[in-house]
Image (cartoon, rainbow, N blue to C red):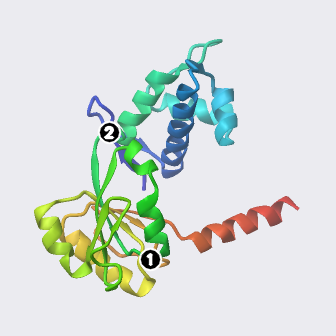
Amino acid sequence: MPDRSTPSDDKPIDLPQPAVGRLSLYYRELHRLLESQQGGVNSQQLGKLVNVSPAVVRRDLSALGTIGRRGVGYDIARLIERIGDVLGSGMQWKVVLVGVGSLGDALLRYRGFERLGFQLSAAFDNAANRIGSTIAGVRVLDAALIESFLAAEPAELAILAVPAEFAADIADRLVGCKINGILNFAPTTLKLPPKVAVVNVDLASELQRLAFAIQTQK
C-alpha cells in the first residue's frame, strides 16, 4: 500500500513506502546541512549522505514536483519546506506512548521527536513502580486510564512498546479512542481496520535483515 501524503497545496501524493522512508532521511540530512550554513545541495551529495544513487534522489524529489537546476542542484531551505509539507512535519502531532519498560523509557528521553513536530503528551504503563513518575517531562499514567485521558486530551498517534501478548488488546483500545496511527515496537502483527496506519519496528527482524545483508556480501 502506498503511503498517502499531503503537501501544503492539499493535493495528495501517492508515494511507495520505501520512498517515504528515504524522504525522511533526506529531511534529516538537509537539516544538518542547513545548520552547517550550506545553501544548496545536488543529488550526488544528498545520495551519498543517505547511501542511495543520485538517480533515486532525483526520482524521489521529482515526485514532489521539485526539480533541481543543472549545475546548481536544490535550494536546501526550500527542499526542507517541501519535504516537510509532504511528510506533515510542519504540523504538530500529539502522541501517546504505551509501555514504559527499557525501550519505552529510552523513547521518552529521545529529544528528536519535538524537532519534527511530535509532542509526547502522556505515557501509560501498568507497573506500580512506574505509574505516577515523570520521565523527560512526560507523565506516566495507569494504563487503565487510556480511554479517559484520550477522551479529555485527544491524540492522533501512539507508540506501542509493550510485550507481544498485550499488544493486540492495547491497540484495539487505542483505535477505539480514535488513534489514527500506531508505531508498533511489539514483535507481533496487529490486525486493525484499514483506516489505521501501522508502522512495525521489530528490532530482532531488523537484525536478521542486517545479518542477511552481511552474508550476501561475503
Q: As displayed, is residue 37 above or below residue 48?
A: above
Provide residue 139's location: percent of width, then percent of height. 28, 66
Looking at the picture, tell me which residue is in the foreground, 180 or 32: 32
Secondary structure beneath dot 1 equals: loop
Provide residue 27's location: percent of width, then percent of height. 50, 37
Instruction: Determine which quarter of the picture holds residue 109.
Output: bottom left
Instruction: Determine which quarter of the picture holds residue 26.
Output: top right
Amino acid of disc 1: Gly
Secondary structure beneath dot 2 equals: loop
Residue 101 bears which disc, if any?
1
Mark 1 and mark 2 lie on one chain; the one further toward the N terminus is 2
User: Residue, x 65% and y 32% (percent of image)?
Assistant: 55
Looking at the picture, tell me which residue is in the foreground, 126 or 171: 126
Provide residue 69's location: percent of width, then percent of height. 57, 14
Provide residue 8's location: percent of width, then percent of height. 29, 31
Looking at the picture, tell me which residue is in the foreground, 155 or 130: 130
Looking at the picture, tell me which residue is in the foreground, 134 or 116: 134
Q: Which residue is mark 2?
A: 6
Callouts 1 and 2 close, C-beta under 8 Å:
no
User: Residue, x 60% and y 33% (percent of image)?
Assistant: 57
Q: Is residue 66 visible?
A: no
Amino acid of disc 2: Thr
